[in-house]
Image: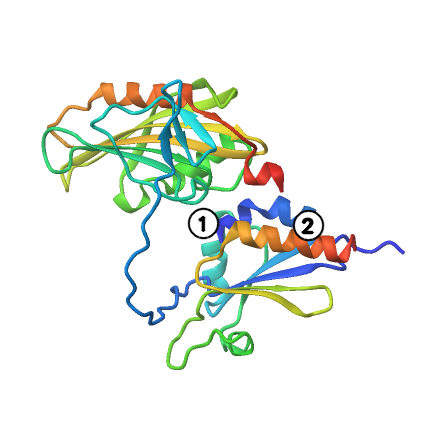
Amino acid sequence: MNMPRHAGIWLLMAAALSGCAPVTAREALPPAPVESPYRIDEQGMAVYGGEFRFLPFPSDWELLSHGNAGDTGIVYYRKDPGSSLARTIVVYSEEPYGSSRDLEKRSAEFMDRYLWDAIMTKKVLERGQVRALGGTGLRLVVEAGDAVEGKKVRAAIVFAHRGERVVAFYATQWRTMDEPFDPGAFLVFDRFVESFGTLKKSFYEEL
Amino acid sequence: MEGHQRNLYLYDRLNAQVVGVSRDDATTLKFWGDSLGITFPLLSNVTGFLGEFYGVLPLGKPVFERRTVIIDRNGVIRYLRDGPPDYREILRVLKQLNREGGQP
């Protein structure tokens, strides 16, 4: 008998779209020591989580992420000279905003949400193709400013495919309105993207 | 919820259907879902009986607590998780359920 595709289904329900995560009382335990997922291999390349390999960042960049790259991503931070606002953050994310598996569509979805809480109107300055993860990626350069709060941001974003899914690399550089952007940080970002490779199949490719 | 939308093609392969439930009204859910590009059903349960049924309706609070529930084809709850969804764990559970149950 032909049945609808979902006639015999697993029903997955997710409650509380607008609810907050429950707060549960827990005993105060000392934090478990966190083993760094980061190491340098024999060729001098950085290896993260046994899964990703890339050129190490210069010593003035700090690795912020210490967990699974799937949800939190790989995050590097640099406090730049100048005001307290001056900083650059570089991220590799396996779950960038949006859901499309098409690079163009995903970039549009991403841009709807990216820097959303900064309430800035973003302007795409550049759009082009780059090599990323062994394929063709989509690279955007974006700027935005907030004259009221006196801050501005410049970002480079690369969308690429890992298997069927879209992943993203992005560098976000914050400055006060009168501070110049530092193109050197974006060169570090570009080297990160160009050198970035995977050492094994992703969770989704193995599912 | 965006994570579920991202995984819809995998849920389809694993013969699963995702449904979101909230106490928000239908109009709010429509705009909220549209803003995230959500295409799976979002159920508005303003009276909250579904939350009571699934144990996510705290006394004196107007919203459900977050809980992910997987129900099998026989209506049996096979997975519960409170707090933010663990999307990879959900996929692993669905894969295991498919192994157990074969194709529908």
Chain under callout 2: B
Secondary structure of the residue carrying tag 2 is: loop
Q: Which residue is mark 2?
A: B14
Residue at image point 60% right, 47% down = B8
Mark 1 Cα shell of 10 Å, populated few (<14), some (14-19), many (≥20): few
Q: Position of residue A181 (x, y in %)?
A: 19, 24
Residue at image point 45% right, 39% down = A109
Q: Which residue is mark 1?
A: B35
Question: Could you tell me if residue A6 is visible in this image?
Answer: no
Secondary structure of the residue carrying tag 1 is: helix
Locate the C terminus of chain A and report the quarter of the image it occupies. top right
> Which label sits in the foreground, 1 or 2?
2
Locate the N terminus of chain A and report the quarter of the image it occupies. bottom right
Front-most of residues B37 and B96:
B96
Left-right relation of B94 to A74: right
Chain under callout 1: B
